Amino acid sequence: MTKSAHISKLEGITVTQGQQIKSLEEKVMLLLEELRKKDIKKDSSNSSLPPSSDFFNKNKSLRTASELKSGGQKGHQGTTLERRSTPDKIIELKDSFCNICGQSLTNARFILKAKRQVIELPPIAPI
């Protein structure tokens, strides 16, 4: 193939590529115009925006607002978990030596300052 034939072939390819580029640019402009017409609001569900940037609340409650403050109301009798009379395990927390001077406390008398009841659930194991 001669040099001039090669150049004319490349010019033909360049012309077709230019036409393709022009066609694709027109399609992109049409698509951008359609997007502008739809006016899609971007939020955290349809983009990479964080939820804190959402300006509207989709999940609006249908309940009417109450005049009462949140939490327990005056005069409401609360309940607490009752202590078991016979716990499974009793752990007495007594020091065997003084933290300051290091003296033995095995014969010392202790004063009960607090009682606690701890409910421990067994670890959850997959089946």
Image (tube, rainbow, N blue to C red):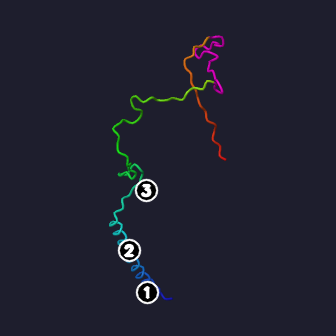
In three-dimensional space, the C-alpha distance between marks 1 and 2, rounded to whole angstroms, equals: 29 Å
What span is in magenta?
86-108
The percent position of residue 51, horizontal first and vertical second, equals 42, 50
**Lower sequence index among marks 1 and 2:** 1
Nearer to me, 71 or 99:
71
Q: Residues within 10 Å of mark 3 (few under 14, many from 20)?
A: few
Which label was assigned to residue 27?
Answer: 2
Residue at left offset 39%, top offset 29% = 74
Vertical order, 43 against 109 (above or below): below
In three-dimensional space, the C-alpha distance between marks 1 and 3, rounded to whole angstroms, equals: 53 Å
In three-dimensional space, the C-alpha distance between marks 3 and 2, rounded to whole angstroms, equals: 27 Å
Nearer to me, 1 or 74:
74
The residue tagged with tag 2: helix, strand or loop?
A: helix
Nearer to me, 83 or 26:
83
Residue at left offset 36%, top offset 66% = 35
Which label was assigned to residue 45?
Answer: 3
Q: Main secondary structure of the magenta part?
A: loop
Q: Nearer the viewer, mark 3 or mark 2?
A: 3
The residue tagged with tag 1: helix, strand or loop?
A: helix
The percent position of residue 24, horizontal first and vertical second, equals 40, 75
**Lower sequence index among marks 3 and 2:** 2
Vertical order, 65 against 48 (above or below): above
Magenta span contains residue 97: yes
Nearer to me, 45 or 70:
70
User: Cβ–Cβ below 8 Å for labels 3 and 2?
Assistant: no
Q: Residues within 10 Å of mark 2 (few under 14, many from 20)?
A: few
Residue carrying label 1: 8
Which amino acid, mark 3?
Answer: Ser
Which amino acid, mark 1?
Answer: Ser
The residue tagged with tag 3: helix, strand or loop?
A: loop
